[in-house]
Image (cartoon, rainbow, N blue to C red):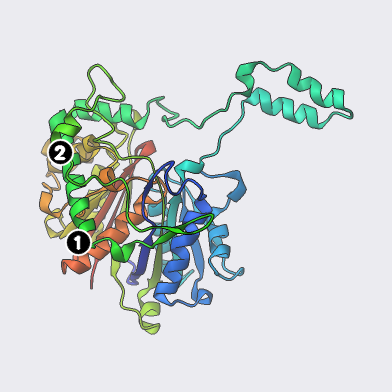
Amino acid sequence: MENKKRVAVVGGIRTPFIKAGGDFKGLSSLDLGKIPAKELINRTDISPGEIDQVIFGTVIPTIKTSNLAREIALGSGVPASVPAFTVTSACASANQAFTSGIDSILSGNSDVVLTGGVESISDFPVLFSKKFRDSFFASSKGNNLFQKTKPFLKMGVSDIAPDVPAISERSTGLTMGESAEKMAMIHRISREDQDRFAQRSHELSSQAASEGVFDEEIVHTFIPPDYAKVVAVDNNVREGLELQTLSDLKPVFDTQYGTITAGNSAALTDGGAAILLMSEEKAKALGYKPMGYVRSYAYGAVDPGDELLMGTAYSTPRALDRAGLTLRDIDLIEMHESFSAQVLSNLNAFASKKFAREKLGRSEAIGEVDINKLNVSGGSIAIGHPFGATGGRLIITLLHRMAKRSANIGLVTLSAAGGIGVSIVFEKE
C-alpha cells in the first residue's frame, strides 16, 4: 500500500464453530454476530461511541435482517448514530468486510471500524415456488373467503414444495465439490494426498485445542433457551483420526471415479467472528497494543468454469508484490481449506513456473510453501466452515499464532465461490 497510514488490528474473537444442526441450531445469524461483537467490545474495553462504522459479511442473507451488520451493531451497544452495512462475497465475505474497513480508515473516513462475518447454516431461508408466491399475492387481493382461497386450489403438490437455495455456481451449474473434483483431476491430486492433508488438519487442530491455543480467540457461548449449556470448543475436530478411516469414506460428488469425500472437505458449520480495526494513530492515542498491522491486501478473480477455487494463486502474488515481500519472507500462513484438493492445487500453482508464465504472466513462480508454516493449528477441514465467518477466523487465528510464535510476517489467503481469491499480508511491527 502506498498510503503511509497503517491499519491496526486491535482485537479479534469468534464463537466456537459448530456443525450445522447442532448446538447452534436455535441461534440466528444475528445472534451469532452479536455474541462475538459484544465480547470483543467488552474485552478491548472500547467505548462503543468511539466506533465510526460497522461492517459484517454473510453469504446466506435472511429477509428478517436484510442489513445484518446494522442489526448486529444496534444489538451490541453501538450507538444508533453509527452507520453499518453488510457485504457478501461468497466465502470471502468476512474478508470483504475487513478490507472495506481498511479502506474506510485509509481514506480518512473512519478511525475505528468493527468488522466481522457470520453464518448460520442451520437457519438458512427456505423459499416457496414462484407459483405459490403468485397464488399468495392473488389471494391477498380477494374480497371474500372464496376469492382468497381460489388461487391456491389451482396448485399441485409440487407447487407447495420448498425451494431450497442452490449451492451450485449459477454460471456453471456445478457445485463446489464438483469443481474440486475438476481441480483434483487437472492438478493430479491423488485421493491419498487429499486424505493425508485432511488427517493433518484434524491432528493439528486437535493438538492446538488440547494445548489451549484457541482459548483466547473463542468466546464461551451459552445456549438458549435456558442458557444452562455452554459451548467453548469447535466440535468438528476429530482427535486421533486415522488415515484408514478417511480412506474408507466413499466419494460424494463423483461416486464412481471421484476423490472428494466428506472427510477431505470442510463441514457445513455455524459461527461468527468479529475484528476491531483502528488507524495506527488512533490505537496509540487510546493506549492499545495492536495484534498486528495490515501491510497489504489483494483480490483476484478467475473463470469459475475452469478454476473456481484457484483465486488464491492469483491474489497472493499481487498481495506480496504490494507488500514488497516474497513468499520466503512469510513466517506463517493461514489458507482456507474448503477441500484438500483446493489447498493442494493452489500450493502446486504457487510452485509452478508453468502456471506463473501461462496464468500470471510472471517469469518465475512465487515459490514453494514450507508446510511447517501452513495452517499450523489445522484448518477449515477440521475446525469447520461457516461461510461468512471463516475469513474472520483465519485472520484471528493467524494473529494469535503469530503472537505465540513471535512471528513478524503472516499471510491469510482464501479461495471462494465465483472464482474469487483474497490475500492479506500482516506484520507485527
The residue indicated by pointer 2 is 242
Residue 363 picture location, percent across and down:
13, 43
Amino acid carrying label 1: it is: Glu
Q: In the picture, which quadrant includes the C terminus? A: bottom left
Residue 41 picture location, percent across and down:
45, 71
Q: Residue at (59%, 24%) from the top-left corner? A: 161
Q: Residue at (30%, 66%) from the top-left corner? A: 216
The residue indicated by pointer 1 is 211
Q: On the rendered structure, is 89 left or right of 428?
A: right
Q: On the rendered structure, is 374 left or right of 23?
A: left
Residue closest to the eye, 212 or 225: 225
Cα separation between marks 1 and 2: 20 Å
Q: Secondary structure at mark 1?
A: loop
Residue closest to the eye, 28 or 57: 28
Q: Identify whether 218 is placed above or below 202.
A: below
Contact, mark 1 vs mark 2 (Cβ under 8 Å): no
Q: So how many labels did they put on this image?
A: 2
Q: Secondary structure at mark 2?
A: loop
Residue closest to the eye, 426 or 299: 426
Amino acid carrying label 2: it is: Glu
Q: Is residue 426 visible?
A: no
Q: Are there few (<14), some (14-19), or many (20+) residues within 10 Å of tag 1?
A: few
Q: Quadrant of residue 125?
A: top right
Q: Are there few (<14), some (14-19), or many (20+) residues within 10 Å of tag 2?
A: some
Q: Of the two numbered discs 1 and 2 on the same chain, state the one appearing first in sequence.
A: 1
Residue 193 picture location, percent across and down:
13, 34
